[in-house]
Image (spheres, coloured by chain):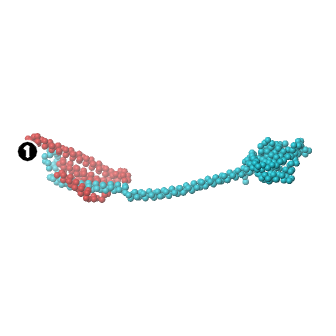
Chain colours: A red, B cyan
Amino acid sequence: MIFLPILALAGGFALFYFSGRGFEADEVFARYTAIAVLAGLDTVLGGLRARLSNQFDDVIFVTGFFANALLASGLVLLGEKLGLETGFGDERVSAMMIAAVVVFGSRIFNNLAALRRMLIERWRARKNLRESRKSTPEFREDLRGA
Amino acid sequence: MNSSIPAGTNLPPRASSGGTWVLSLTGICFLFGMLLAMQIRAQQKVSARRDSDRSTPMLAQNEILSLRKRLARESAGRAAMQAKLNKVQQDLALAATGSLSQKTKLQAQMQDLQMLAGLTPVRGSGVVVTMTDHPKAAKGGGSDGFLYGIVHDFDILQVVNELRAAGAEAIAVQGAGGEPIRVTGFSPIRCVGPVIYVDGEGVAPPFRVEAVGNADRMAAALRMPDGIVDKFSVLFPIKVREADDLKLPASESAPKMRVAKAN
């Protein structure tokens, strides 16, 4: 079941990467979609984490995906409109972009760490269960009764 | 799915029911994949365009054009500068040769003037007049105080005068045992007591008057009938001889112009 989202990810990627022309390459536009991609990655990882900790909610997940992406892009856009920039000329860097990258980056790292921990715990628990089943049939019986 | 997981026992109940999470996750993952692909494509295009901007042949062409223009401009400026330099050099050379020729001309003129003034030694052909006191000349003087038979200062002066009239170009007077004294336009010939002074220097007989110039003419002038030689030879011995190579010294006394000014 978990392969379905991965397949969908690969399929969507392949569909647009190999067939589609994407959107017309625009440096300014690409900057906002980059932030949107970062937000989307954070949302997907957060969704997986929520799923593993039994806190998954469809509505929160789906709305979170779009809201995060749009909000992130919008905030960067707002920051640029407000002139929150450092540097001069072509070397200008949007300060809001840095903020978004830092926040989403740390969140992605946190999510990844939590996912890793959960997966390892799950795997250990399953292994322990299997071993206890093999070694103590009485306990197995007991479990079956529960 | 797996109901045997003991984890999350103290967590709140699952918000999502059944297998709908898979659907929503799949949809979002599909969208996310699309977004990722779009972004990567766009970024590829952007960076490709940036690279091509940097090394586009058009840009290089423009650069070459501007450099060519600059080269033409600079070389035009250089040509102008070179022309200016050439002109200045020509002027300089002209001035140098001009001043050189002027200098040589001035030097020649100065030499001429020095020769005229008797400030340079001269040599050339001419005549030599020798005069000496008559051996039997009176020593004590006549009744009128005039001593006949000896060479007087005005005798020498007369000879010099005659030589000048005959076109002498340089004249010198030599006394016995002395150096020849150049006679110029400023040289007095006179006597103080019994001594004749030529240009301030005392001379003694026999006197030797040397003159550079047209020898024939001067000799003829001196020897003309009833001339110097005729007149003097009755008083004291006088000889005129033509000489091929006379060497006359420079005048040693040039007057300083204290009053006269060039006008």
Q: In front: B144, or A128?
A: B144
Q: Reply above or below: A23 against B182.
A: below
Farthest top residue?
A: A135
Q: In front: B207, or B48?
A: B207
Residue plotted at (31% across, 58% down) = A25
Q: In front: A137, or A51?
A: A137
- Spot occupied by residue A6 in the image (x, y as percentages of width and height): 20, 52
Residue A74 makes an appearance in the image: no
Badge 1: residue crowd in 10 Å (few <14, some 14–19, many ≥20) = few
Residue plotted at (48% across, 56% down) = B74
- Side of A53 where B68 appears, left or right: right
- Spot occupied by residue B149 in the image (x, y as percentages of width and height): 87, 45
Q: What's the chain of the residue with tag 1? A: A
What residue is shown with label 1?
Answer: A145
- Spot occupied by residue B60 in the image (x, y as percentages of width and height): 40, 57
Quadrant of residue B40 within the rendered picture? bottom left
- Side of A13 where A127 appears, left or right: left
Residue plotted at (27% across, 58% down) = A22
Q: Secondary structure at mark 1?
A: helix
Name the kind of residue labelled 1 in the image: Gly
